[in-house]
Each structure stands twice: as C-alpha cells, then as structure tokens.
C-alpha cells in the first residue's frame, strides 16, 4: 500500500487518525463523513489529512516530524464492535496512548460507548445509559444511518446545531461525572491520561460520555 503523502501548502494541517476506519484508499467511517462534510469548506487557515487503520505508521511518522501541526485520534470504547473483549480493548487504547503521550500536539478523543454518543449531543445533553447500539442510533435521529449519504444530506443541519452540541457535550460530561465518586477535573474539562488502566476503566463505568467537543475546540483554535 502506498504511504499517505502530505503535500506542503500554505495552510496548516490537522492530522486525524481513525483507528477503527477500515477504508483502503480513502476513509469510509462516520467520523470521516462528519468532519469532511461539516468542516472541509469552512476552515480558513487549515486543512484536514485523514489516516485509516492501515495508515497508522504514516500518522505516527508525521506526528514525529511535524511539531507545528495539530493531531487527533478519534475512537470509541465499544469493545464488542471491535471484536475484542474488555481487557483487550483497554490494552489497545493504552498502547495507542503510550505511542502519542510525548507529543503535546496530539491527544486521544474517546466516545463511550460509540461515536453516536457525540451525535446525540446535537439534540440534547445526552446522558442516557448505553443499552445497545441500535437504541443509541435511534436517539441520534429516527432516520439516522451510518452512511456517507446521510451525513452529506444532514451536514447543514448538523453544522447549524454545532454550538448547541458543544455546550450539550460539556454539560452532559459534567452531569455524568458529578455522579461518579473521586472523579477529578481531568475527566470533566480535560482529556484523561489513557495510559492509566484505572482511567479507562472509569470510562467503562461511566458508560455514556464523549470528548469530541474538545477536539473541535482545538480545531477552531488552530484555525483562528
């Protein structure tokens, strides 16, 4: 497979690694559809470069070289969807967190249990405990589909509700964390250290939470 070649241009680059994306020549995940359709023509000073699971080495290579670029890893904690058991999923996330921990310009942005937790924030400060993926997708929208066509058709509406989603996400995270004993500020306003097993286990315990809003905050700051 050819390496991902990032052409130098006048725009700053935001590198997005999607470890659950199975795309070969191009990404095919819901996360890719969301960022591509909502932001591609709305960024002023930046451009996106995406990396699928097959392009992990390329992502890490650019992370080591490009100190002034912005990087993010978008993934979820749904161990059943990944085909792994809970302990295997924890090990996978820890391994990835350890690979990027020395770089201040890159973080893991996790959704529990899946990406659709973030999508629900466009409607409300969503804290409903996870039961199954079908029910979660129904809470996104009655007509929700994990397809390129759905994200394309709904991109304008999603962008118009983005400010609400960002506020809802922060509120939901605070509401959920207030019910969990011994939770620090790093779980509410920051990205927890995912090299620590205890922190990942806490997310399993919390069950419904996402940090995608913090990645979008970072995109806006980097693009300003």
Image: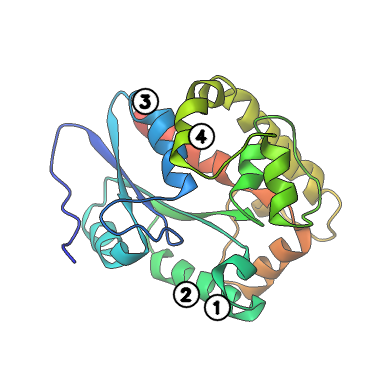
Q: Locate residue 131: give its quadrant.
A: bottom right
Q: Position of residue 155 (x, y in %)?
A: 48, 27
Q: Can residue 113 be seen by looking at this rendering?
A: yes
Q: Position of residue 98 (x, y in %)?
A: 45, 71
Residue 7 vertical placement versus 37 (above, below) = below
- What residue sits right under mark 4 in the picture? 150
The residue to which callout 3 is attached is: 224
Disc 2 versus disc 3: nearer the observer: 2
**Residue at x 14%, y 36% (from the top left corner):** 9
Report which quarter residue 21 is drawn in: bottom left
For marks 4 and 2, the one nearer the N-term is: 2
For disc 1, the neighbor class at 10 Å (few under 14, some 14 to 19, many from 20) is: some
Q: Which secondary structure, mark 4? A: helix
On the rendered image, what quadrant is the C terminus found in? top left
In terms of depth relative to the viewer, which is nearer, 51 or 140? 140
Sequence-first tag of 1 and 3: 1
- Measured in 3D between alpha carbons, the distance from the residue under mark 4 to the one under mark 2, in whole angstroms, is 33 Å
Residue 64: give its label.
Answer: none
Residue 105 relative to residue 95: left or right: left
- Give the mark toward the camera: 4 or 2: 4
**1 and 2 marks in contact (CB < 8 Å):** yes
In the rendered image, the vertical position of residue 135 relative to residue 22, given as above or below: above
Residue, disc 2: 95
From the viewer's side, name the closer residue of 83 and 170: 83
Give the CA distance from mark 1 to mark 2.
6 Å
Q: Are marks 4 and 3 in contact (CB under 8 Å)?
A: no
Spatial CA distance of label 4 from label 1 is: 33 Å
Residue marked by disc 1: 91
**Relative to residue 93, is residue 121 drawn left or right?**
right
Quadrant the N terminus occupies: bottom left
Alpha carbon distance from label 1 to label 3 = 36 Å
Q: State the SS at label 3.
A: loop
């Amino acid at each position: 497979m050819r390496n991902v070649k990032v052409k130098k241009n006048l725009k700053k680059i935001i590198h997005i690694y999607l470890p659950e994306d199975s795309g070969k020549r191009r990404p095919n995940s819901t996360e890719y559809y969301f960022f591509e359709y909502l932001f591609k023509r709305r960024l002023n000073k930046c451009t996106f470069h995406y990396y699928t699971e097959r392009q992990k080495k390329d992502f890490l290579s650019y992370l080591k070289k490009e100190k002034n670029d912005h990087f993010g890893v978008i993934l979820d904690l749904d161990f059943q969807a990944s085909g792994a058991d809970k302990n295997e999923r924890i090990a996978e996330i820890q391994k990835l967190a350890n690979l990027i921990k020395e770089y201040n310009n890159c973080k893991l942005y996790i959704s529990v249990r899946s990406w659709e937790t973030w999508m629900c924030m466009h409607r409300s400060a969503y804290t409903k405990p996870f039961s199954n993926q079908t029910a979660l997708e129904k809470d996104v929208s009655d007509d929700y589909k994990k397809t390129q066509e759905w994200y394309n058709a709904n991109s304008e509406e999603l962008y118009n509700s983005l400010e609400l989603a960002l506020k809802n996400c922060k509120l939901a995270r605070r509401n959920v964390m207030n019910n969990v004993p011994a939770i620090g500020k790093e779980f509410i306003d920051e990205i927890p250290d995912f090299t620590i097993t205890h922190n990942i286990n806490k997310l399993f315990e919390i069950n419904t939470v996402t940090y995608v809003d913090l990645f979008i905050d970072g995109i806006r700051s980097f693009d300003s």
